[in-house]
Image: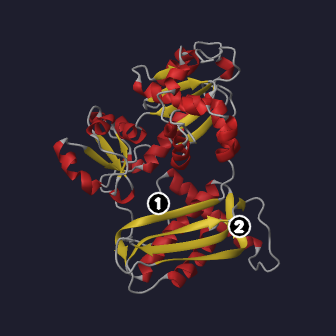
């Protein structure tokens, strides 16, 4: 029997709150003159497009397009171009997520600009009105526009949010829509949350081309290829909540810091500086995550588009897990020497920490020669550096091994000020 309005007595209600054109909205927040103008935000080294305003989408510029290929439309349409400003974006994301916590006890941060909210306790309210309150509060407190999609399952909430983005109100409650199957019949199977392109091709080969086709497909067929995850997605499309809220972050299994260089590195000292800087950055991540690494990998490669391509990596296991920058840097310095080859122009490098454990559960070693006093000094040093850098700005304090000139540093020629995270970049009002 075709479904119409979903049962209002269903226990679950989820909202997916998604920031509209998030990076562009962050830039417009402190520069209102950009409102209504076409704006793009570029990736590291200003290489390609990672975010677009609606005006740019209407022009036809796609995500991932190299910037050198769009010089002509940039000039013709007077497109405003900005380098990525991740410090600003991350801070504003945190403010959005903190605001959402006022509306429900359970909030799952899905990405930097998306979050699920469990509205099950509010299902007897007018959720369209409640969604409007959420939009207005986030706009008033943070200044970022959001869209709100509401449904009895997380998968359907994703679809509802896509519709909300296209509506004038920015809100869509799928649970009260008169014909859900009609909506599902218009959604390509490849656009369903959790369906990758390989699964989408497999489904299309079996004439399952829309979300409605997947909903009505034989469960045995879906499970035979996609397993229990595919079966859960199918049941979610039927209105049965199978994906619970993930309120506790799973411990990370690895941490990486890497970059492509704006200009190739052809000497060992510059490569060591870059690796030292990446080690410092990754160690900061470990301490924020309250984890320590037991395995270190260093890698470097030349451009794959040039002749004489070279790529290499080296891995070692630490005798004692750690998140102290000095200890980690000693090891990465040795590893980078082992993979460096004279005569090559390195275009990308990085460090990867794996074998992560809680920093409260580090297994000691009989052969550990460091005394407790030395360990305490290292811990205090890194703690002071982290505190000062967080209070003022990144790299206010850094180790000399990371270099001074840093010729390898990421290019960000059009980056806006870090208005909310750097004292020197505070907005000035005249």
Q: Is residue 172 above or below residue 396?
A: above
C-alpha span from label 1 to label 2: 23 Å
Q: Is residue 56 above or below residue 422?
A: above
Q: Earlier in the sequence, mark 1 or mark 2?
A: 2
Give the crowd class for mark 2: few <14, some 14-19, many >=20 residues within 10 Å. few
Which mark is drawn over residue 376?
A: 2
Judge from the rendering whether residue 6 lies leftward or rightward of residue 419; answer left or right.
right
SS for callout 2:
helix
Pick out the residue farthest to the left: 76
| Residue 336 visible at all | yes
Q: Is residue 288 above or below residue 148?
A: below
Q: Which residue is mark 1?
A: 396
SS for callout 1:
loop
Q: Position of residue 382 (x, y in %)?
A: 61, 63
Q: Position of residue 233 (x, y in %)?
A: 63, 36
The foreground one among 308 and 79 is 308
Q: Residue at x 58, y 34 (%)?
A: 214
* Quarter of the image that includes the C terminus: top left
The foreground one among 29 and 220 is 220
Pick out the residue farthest to the bottom: 342
Q: Position of residue 166 (x, y in %)?
A: 40, 26
Judge from the rendering whether residue 37 lies leftward or rightward of residue 15; answer left or right.
left
Q: Residue at x 61, y 76 (%)?
A: 315
Q: Quadrant of residue 348?
A: bottom left
């Amino acid at each position: 029997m075709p479904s119409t309005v979903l049962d209002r007595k269903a226990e679950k209600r989820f909202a997916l709150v998604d920031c509209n054109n998030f990076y562009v909205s962050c830039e417009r927040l402190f520069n209102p003159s950009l409102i209504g103008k076409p704006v793009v935000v570029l990736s590291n080294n200003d290489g390609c497009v990672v975010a677009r305003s609606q005006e740019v989408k209407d022009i036809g510029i796609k995500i991932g397009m190299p910037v050198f290929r769009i010089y002509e439309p940039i000039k013709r349409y007077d497109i405003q171009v900005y380098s990525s400003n991740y410090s600003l974006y991350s801070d504003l994301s945190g403010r959005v997520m903190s605001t959402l916590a006022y509306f429900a006890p359970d909030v799952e941060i899905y990405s930097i600009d998306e979050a699920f909210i469990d509205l099950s306790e509010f299902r007897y309210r007018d959720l369209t009105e409640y969604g409007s309150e959420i939009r207005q509060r986030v706009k008033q407190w943070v200044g970022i526009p959001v869209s709100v999609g509401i449904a009895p399952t997380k998968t359907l909430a994703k679809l509802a949010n896509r519709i909300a983005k296209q509506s004038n109100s920015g809100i869509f409650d799928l649970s009260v829509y008169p014909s859900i199957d009609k909506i599902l019949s218009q959604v390509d199977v490849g656009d369903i949350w959790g369906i990758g392109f390989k699964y989408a091709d497999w489904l299309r080969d079996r004439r399952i081309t829309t979300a409605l086709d997947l909903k009505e497909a034989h469960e045995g067929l879906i499970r035979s290829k996609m397993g229990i995850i595919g079966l859960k997605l199918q049941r979610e499309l039927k209105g049965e909540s199978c994906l619970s809220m993930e309120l506790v972050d799973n411990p990370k299994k690895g941490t990486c810091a890497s970059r492509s260089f704006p200009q190739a590195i052809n000497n060992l000292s510059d490569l060591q500086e870059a690796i030292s800087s990446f080690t410092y950055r990754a160690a900061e991540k470990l301490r924020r995550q309250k984890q320590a690494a037991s395995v270190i990998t260093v890698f470097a490669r030349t451009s794959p588009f040039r002749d004489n391509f070279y790529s290499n990596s080296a891995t070692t296991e630490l005798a004692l897990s750690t998140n102290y920058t000095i200890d980690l840097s000693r090891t990465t310095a040795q590893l980078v020497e082992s993979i460096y080859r004279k005569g090559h122009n390195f275009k990308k490098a990085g460090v990867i920490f794996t074998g992560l454990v809680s920093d409260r559960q580090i297994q000691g070693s009989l052969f550990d020669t460091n005394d407790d006093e030395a360990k305490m000094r290292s811990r205090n040093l890194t703690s002071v550096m982290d505190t000062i850098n967080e209070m003022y700005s990144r790299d206010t304090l850094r180790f000399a091994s990371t270099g001074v000139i840093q010729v390898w540093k990421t290019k960000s020629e059009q980056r806006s000020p870090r208005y909310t995270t750097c004292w020197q970049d505070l907005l000035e009002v005249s």
